[in-house]
Image (cartoon, rainbow, N blue to C red):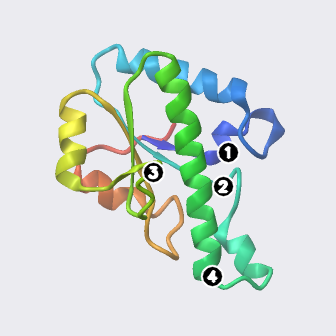
Amino acid sequence: MKLSGEALAGERGFGIDPETVTQVAADIKDVYELGIEIAIVVGGGNLWRGEAGAQMGMERAQADYVGMLGTTMNALALQDALESAGVPTRVQTAIEMRQVAEPYVRRKAVRHLERVVLLFLVPEPVHHTFQQTPLPHCVQLKSMLKPF
């Protein structure tokens, strides 16, 4: 499932709204309790857009990296809300940050899904938007992508 970063901002329109994240986690928990395997690709547009940074003169790759950190922040906030609700999760990322997330390894991701453990995939390639990134991962995981 694709989860837009803006969906976590709530009515504020920017940042991470705790009540909204808790409600999104409750909705995901309802699906999880049906026994459905869930993989979520989280966006970061509620915190940063790489294109905006590039427009203000920031090197595009650097701006994209800032956006990826925003995406990671969203994934960690949602992970905390889900685990507080009793839903086991894993955050995986293609960018090395082992203190906060597992490295993305396709076979490991598939194993997590087979155990019905919720999995987050954090987008990786520079110059890719959130809308472009999920497809290769979902194809690798043999998943269908549905907007949330």
Quadrant for the N terminus in the image? top left
Q: Earlier in the sequence, mark 2 or mark 1?
A: 1
The answer to whether residue 142 is visible is no
SS assignment at label 4: helix
Q: Earlier in the sequence, mark 1 or mark 4?
A: 1
**Which of the labelled discs sits on residue 60, or is there none?**
4
Residue at x 23% of width, y 49% of height = 141
* Residue 62: image location, x then y, percent: 62, 78
Q: Amino acid at mark 1?
A: Glu
Proximity of marks 2 and 1: CB atoms separated by less than 8 Å = yes
Give 76 or 98, whichever is nearer the viewer: 98
Proximity of marks 2 and 3: CB atoms separated by less than 8 Å = no
Q: Earlier in the sequence, mark 2 or mark 4?
A: 2
Residue highlighted by disc 3: 99
SS assignment at label 1: helix
The answer to whether residue 139 is visible is yes
Proximity of marks 4 and 3: CB atoms separated by less than 8 Å = no
Q: Earlier in the sequence, mark 4 or mark 3?
A: 4
Residue highlighted by disc 2: 45
Residue highlighted by disc 1: 6
| Rendering quarter of residue 10 | top right
Instruction: Judge depth for marks 1 and 3 and give the one in front.
Output: 3
How far apart in space, not on screen, are marks 2 and 4 (Cα)?
15 Å
SS assignment at label 2: loop
